[in-house]
Image: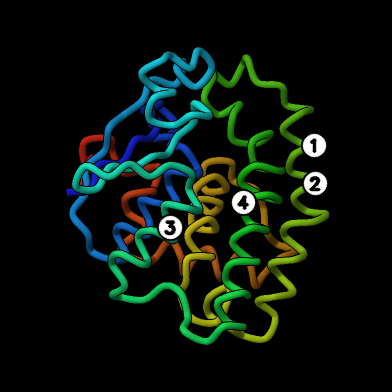
Amino acid sequence: MIRLATTEREYPWGVLRSTHASKIKFVLAEKHLAWEVERVRPGDLWKKPPEMLARHPLGKVPWIEDDGFLVWDSTAILEYLEERYPDPPLLPSEPRARADVRMTETFVDEALLAGDLPAIWMPCWVPEEKRDQAAIEQGRSRLRQCGLPWLEARLGDGRSWICGELSLADAGLAATAMVLQVDGLALDDFPQVAAYFDRLRARPAYRVLDPRTSLEDSACG
Protein backbone atom coordinates (compact mmCIF):
# COMPACT_ATOMS: atom_id res chain seq x y z
CA MET A 1 0.00 0.00 0.00
CA ILE A 2 1.21 3.51 -0.85
CA ARG A 3 1.48 5.92 2.06
CA LEU A 4 0.92 9.60 1.22
CA ALA A 5 2.14 12.34 3.56
CA THR A 6 -0.04 15.42 3.41
CA THR A 7 -1.54 18.26 5.43
CA GLU A 8 -5.31 18.22 5.98
CA ARG A 9 -7.59 19.84 8.52
CA GLU A 10 -11.33 19.93 9.10
CA TYR A 11 -13.09 23.29 9.53
CA PRO A 12 -16.76 24.30 9.71
CA TRP A 13 -16.44 25.59 6.12
CA GLY A 14 -14.97 22.33 4.79
CA VAL A 15 -11.99 19.99 4.86
CA LEU A 16 -8.88 21.77 3.63
CA ARG A 17 -6.01 19.89 2.01
CA SER A 18 -2.56 20.57 0.64
CA THR A 19 -2.97 21.45 -3.03
CA HIS A 20 0.20 19.66 -4.14
CA ALA A 21 -0.69 16.53 -2.18
CA SER A 22 -4.20 16.69 -3.64
CA LYS A 23 -2.65 16.23 -7.09
CA ILE A 24 -1.29 12.93 -5.86
CA LYS A 25 -4.56 11.85 -4.24
CA PHE A 26 -6.40 12.49 -7.48
CA VAL A 27 -3.99 10.35 -9.50
CA LEU A 28 -3.97 7.55 -6.90
CA ALA A 29 -7.76 7.46 -7.11
CA GLU A 30 -7.82 7.61 -10.92
CA LYS A 31 -5.42 4.66 -11.06
CA HIS A 32 -7.44 2.72 -8.45
CA LEU A 33 -4.37 2.17 -6.30
CA ALA A 34 -4.42 1.22 -2.63
CA TRP A 35 -3.21 4.11 -0.48
CA GLU A 36 -3.47 5.63 2.96
CA VAL A 37 -2.80 9.10 4.36
CA GLU A 38 -0.14 10.09 6.84
CA ARG A 39 -1.19 13.49 8.15
CA VAL A 40 1.55 16.03 8.82
CA ARG A 41 0.88 18.79 11.34
CA PRO A 42 0.48 22.14 9.53
CA GLY A 43 2.91 23.76 11.99
CA ASP A 44 5.65 21.36 10.89
CA LEU A 45 5.63 23.02 7.46
CA TRP A 46 7.07 26.08 9.21
CA LYS A 47 9.12 24.40 11.95
CA LYS A 48 10.58 21.71 9.64
CA PRO A 49 11.59 19.24 12.36
CA PRO A 50 14.48 16.85 11.64
CA GLU A 51 12.22 13.84 11.19
CA MET A 52 10.35 15.71 8.44
CA LEU A 53 13.53 16.87 6.69
CA ALA A 54 14.72 13.27 6.71
CA ARG A 55 11.80 12.41 4.43
CA HIS A 56 11.59 15.61 2.37
CA PRO A 57 14.79 17.71 2.42
CA LEU A 58 12.82 20.89 1.66
CA GLY A 59 10.43 20.29 4.56
CA LYS A 60 7.32 20.20 2.40
CA VAL A 61 4.45 17.88 1.56
CA PRO A 62 3.77 15.66 -0.23
CA TRP A 63 5.98 12.63 -0.15
CA ILE A 64 5.04 9.01 -0.64
CA GLU A 65 6.41 5.70 0.50
CA ASP A 66 5.79 2.78 -1.83
CA ASP A 67 7.01 -0.60 -0.63
CA GLY A 68 9.76 1.11 1.36
CA PHE A 69 10.78 3.48 -1.47
CA LEU A 70 10.55 7.21 -0.67
CA VAL A 71 9.63 9.76 -3.34
CA TRP A 72 9.24 13.49 -2.70
CA ASP A 73 8.16 16.45 -4.88
CA SER A 74 4.67 16.30 -6.34
CA THR A 75 5.74 16.24 -10.00
CA ALA A 76 8.36 13.55 -9.38
CA ILE A 77 5.69 11.53 -7.56
CA LEU A 78 3.25 11.83 -10.47
CA GLU A 79 5.91 10.66 -12.94
CA TYR A 80 6.90 7.79 -10.64
CA LEU A 81 3.30 6.63 -10.25
CA GLU A 82 2.76 6.79 -14.01
CA GLU A 83 5.86 4.71 -14.74
CA ARG A 84 5.35 2.17 -11.95
CA TYR A 85 1.57 1.86 -12.40
CA PRO A 86 0.94 2.68 -16.09
CA ASP A 87 -2.73 1.57 -16.23
CA PRO A 88 -4.83 3.49 -16.85
CA PRO A 89 -2.33 5.75 -18.65
CA LEU A 90 -2.26 9.43 -17.72
CA LEU A 91 0.67 10.33 -19.97
CA PRO A 92 0.42 9.96 -23.76
CA SER A 93 2.87 7.79 -25.70
CA GLU A 94 3.48 10.32 -28.50
CA PRO A 95 6.49 12.58 -27.66
CA ARG A 96 4.86 15.93 -28.49
CA ALA A 97 1.70 15.05 -26.60
CA ARG A 98 3.84 14.00 -23.60
CA ALA A 99 5.70 17.31 -23.78
CA ASP A 100 2.39 19.19 -23.85
CA VAL A 101 1.21 17.41 -20.70
CA ARG A 102 4.50 18.15 -18.92
CA MET A 103 4.51 21.82 -19.96
CA THR A 104 0.90 22.23 -18.88
CA GLU A 105 1.56 20.51 -15.56
CA THR A 106 4.47 22.93 -14.98
CA PHE A 107 2.24 25.93 -15.75
CA VAL A 108 -0.40 24.71 -13.33
CA ASP A 109 2.22 24.17 -10.63
CA GLU A 110 4.02 27.48 -11.04
CA ALA A 111 1.24 29.85 -12.08
CA LEU A 112 -1.56 28.42 -9.97
CA LEU A 113 -0.63 26.05 -7.14
CA ALA A 114 2.53 27.94 -6.15
CA GLY A 115 1.53 31.21 -7.82
CA ASP A 116 -1.84 32.89 -7.39
CA LEU A 117 -3.77 30.28 -5.38
CA PRO A 118 -1.87 30.52 -2.06
CA ALA A 119 -3.15 34.09 -1.58
CA ILE A 120 -6.66 32.65 -1.78
CA TRP A 121 -6.11 29.26 -0.11
CA MET A 122 -3.86 29.97 2.85
CA PRO A 123 -6.29 32.42 4.51
CA CYS A 124 -8.95 29.70 4.45
CA TRP A 125 -6.93 27.90 7.15
CA VAL A 126 -7.70 30.65 9.71
CA PRO A 127 -11.02 32.08 10.97
CA GLU A 128 -12.71 34.46 8.58
CA GLU A 129 -12.31 37.46 10.88
CA LYS A 130 -8.53 37.05 10.76
CA ARG A 131 -8.24 36.93 6.95
CA ASP A 132 -6.68 39.72 4.92
CA GLN A 133 -9.51 40.24 2.45
CA ALA A 134 -7.52 42.74 0.36
CA ALA A 135 -4.73 40.19 -0.15
CA ILE A 136 -7.27 37.51 -1.05
CA GLU A 137 -8.84 39.79 -3.64
CA GLN A 138 -5.42 40.51 -5.10
CA GLY A 139 -4.91 36.77 -5.56
CA ARG A 140 -8.28 36.47 -7.27
CA SER A 141 -7.45 39.43 -9.52
CA ARG A 142 -4.13 37.88 -10.60
CA LEU A 143 -5.93 34.61 -11.28
CA ARG A 144 -8.44 36.39 -13.51
CA GLN A 145 -5.62 38.14 -15.38
CA CYS A 146 -3.35 35.18 -16.15
CA GLY A 147 -4.25 31.64 -15.13
CA LEU A 148 -7.96 31.61 -15.93
CA PRO A 149 -7.63 33.26 -19.39
CA TRP A 150 -4.90 30.76 -20.30
CA LEU A 151 -7.11 27.84 -19.30
CA GLU A 152 -10.13 29.33 -21.06
CA ALA A 153 -8.17 29.63 -24.31
CA ARG A 154 -6.94 26.02 -24.16
CA LEU A 155 -10.44 24.72 -23.51
CA GLY A 156 -11.95 26.86 -26.25
CA ASP A 157 -11.65 24.14 -28.91
CA GLY A 158 -14.19 21.97 -27.10
CA ARG A 159 -11.77 19.50 -25.52
CA SER A 160 -13.00 17.77 -22.38
CA TRP A 161 -9.65 17.76 -20.56
CA ILE A 162 -6.83 20.27 -20.48
CA CYS A 163 -4.56 18.30 -22.84
CA GLY A 164 -7.31 16.48 -24.75
CA GLU A 165 -7.32 13.14 -22.95
CA LEU A 166 -7.36 12.97 -19.15
CA SER A 167 -3.73 13.27 -18.02
CA LEU A 168 -1.36 14.13 -15.20
CA ALA A 169 -1.90 17.79 -16.10
CA ASP A 170 -5.52 17.57 -14.94
CA ALA A 171 -4.43 16.52 -11.44
CA GLY A 172 -3.20 19.97 -10.43
CA LEU A 173 -6.33 21.49 -11.90
CA ALA A 174 -8.46 19.16 -9.78
CA ALA A 175 -6.67 20.74 -6.80
CA THR A 176 -7.45 24.17 -8.27
CA ALA A 177 -11.11 23.20 -8.56
CA MET A 178 -10.99 22.21 -4.88
CA VAL A 179 -9.64 25.62 -3.85
CA LEU A 180 -12.21 27.54 -5.86
CA GLN A 181 -15.01 25.34 -4.54
CA VAL A 182 -14.21 26.63 -1.07
CA ASP A 183 -13.53 30.20 -2.18
CA GLY A 184 -16.63 30.45 -4.34
CA LEU A 185 -14.93 32.58 -7.00
CA ALA A 186 -17.41 33.47 -9.74
CA LEU A 187 -16.36 32.15 -13.15
CA ASP A 188 -19.00 33.91 -15.27
CA ASP A 189 -16.27 35.36 -17.52
CA PHE A 190 -14.69 31.92 -17.98
CA PRO A 191 -17.51 29.55 -19.02
CA GLN A 192 -15.19 26.91 -20.48
CA VAL A 193 -13.19 26.77 -17.24
CA ALA A 194 -16.36 26.61 -15.16
CA ALA A 195 -17.67 23.66 -17.22
CA TYR A 196 -14.27 21.96 -17.04
CA PHE A 197 -14.13 22.28 -13.25
CA ASP A 198 -17.63 20.81 -13.10
CA ARG A 199 -16.41 17.81 -15.12
CA LEU A 200 -13.45 17.34 -12.79
CA ARG A 201 -15.68 17.54 -9.71
CA ALA A 202 -18.02 14.96 -11.24
CA ARG A 203 -15.27 12.33 -11.50
CA PRO A 204 -15.32 9.67 -8.76
CA ALA A 205 -11.64 10.42 -8.05
CA TYR A 206 -12.51 13.98 -7.01
CA ARG A 207 -14.37 12.70 -3.95
CA VAL A 208 -11.09 12.34 -2.03
CA LEU A 209 -10.41 16.07 -2.61
CA ASP A 210 -13.94 17.36 -2.16
CA PRO A 211 -14.09 19.76 0.81
CA ARG A 212 -17.37 18.08 1.76
CA THR A 213 -15.63 14.70 2.20
CA SER A 214 -14.63 14.15 5.82
CA LEU A 215 -11.09 13.36 6.95
CA GLU A 216 -12.23 9.85 7.89
CA ASP A 217 -13.78 9.20 4.49
CA SER A 218 -10.70 10.42 2.59
CA ALA A 219 -8.01 8.74 4.68
CA CYS A 220 -7.44 5.82 2.33
CA GLY A 221 -8.36 4.44 -1.04
Circle 4 sits in a helix, a strand or a loop, which is it?
helix
Of circles 3 and 1, the one toward us is 3
Q: Earlier in the sequence, mark 4 or mark 3?
A: 3
In the rendering, which numbered label is found on residue 109? 4
Q: CA distance from mark 1 to mark 2?
A: 6 Å
Circle 2 sits in a helix, a strand or a loop, which is it?
helix
- C-beta proximity under 8 Å, tags 1 and 2: yes
- C-beta proximity under 8 Å, tags 2 and 4: no
Q: Please name whichever residue, 17 or 75, is drawn nearer the observer in this view of the structure.
A: 75
Which residue is identified by label 2? 142
Q: Earlier in the sequence, mark 2 or mark 4?
A: 4
Of circles 4 and 3, the one toward us is 3
Percent of width and height locating residue 193: 63, 67
At a point 32% along the width and 41% down the height, the residue shown is 70
Q: Please name whichever residue, 67 or 36, is drawn nearer the observer in this view of the structure.
A: 67
At a point 38% along the width and 56% down the height, the residue shown is 26
Which residue is identified by label 3? 78
At a point 74% along the width and 39% down the height, the residue shown is 139
User: Considering only vertical position in the picture, is 114 above or below 132?
Assistant: below
Direction from residue 38 to residue 173 in the image, left or right: right
Q: Earlier in the sequence, mark 4 or mark 1?
A: 4
Q: Earlier in the sequence, mark 3 or mark 2?
A: 3
User: Considering only vertical position in the picture, is 210 above or below 202?
Assistant: above
Q: CA distance from mark 4 to mark 3?
A: 12 Å
Which residue is identified by label 1? 138
Q: Earlier in the sequence, mark 3 or mark 1?
A: 3
The residue at the far right in this view is 145
- 10 Å neighbourhood of mark 2: few (<14), some, or many (≥20)? some
- Amino acid type at circle 1 is Gln
Image colouring: rainbow
- Amino acid type at circle 3 is Leu
- C-beta proximity under 8 Å, tags 4 and 1: no
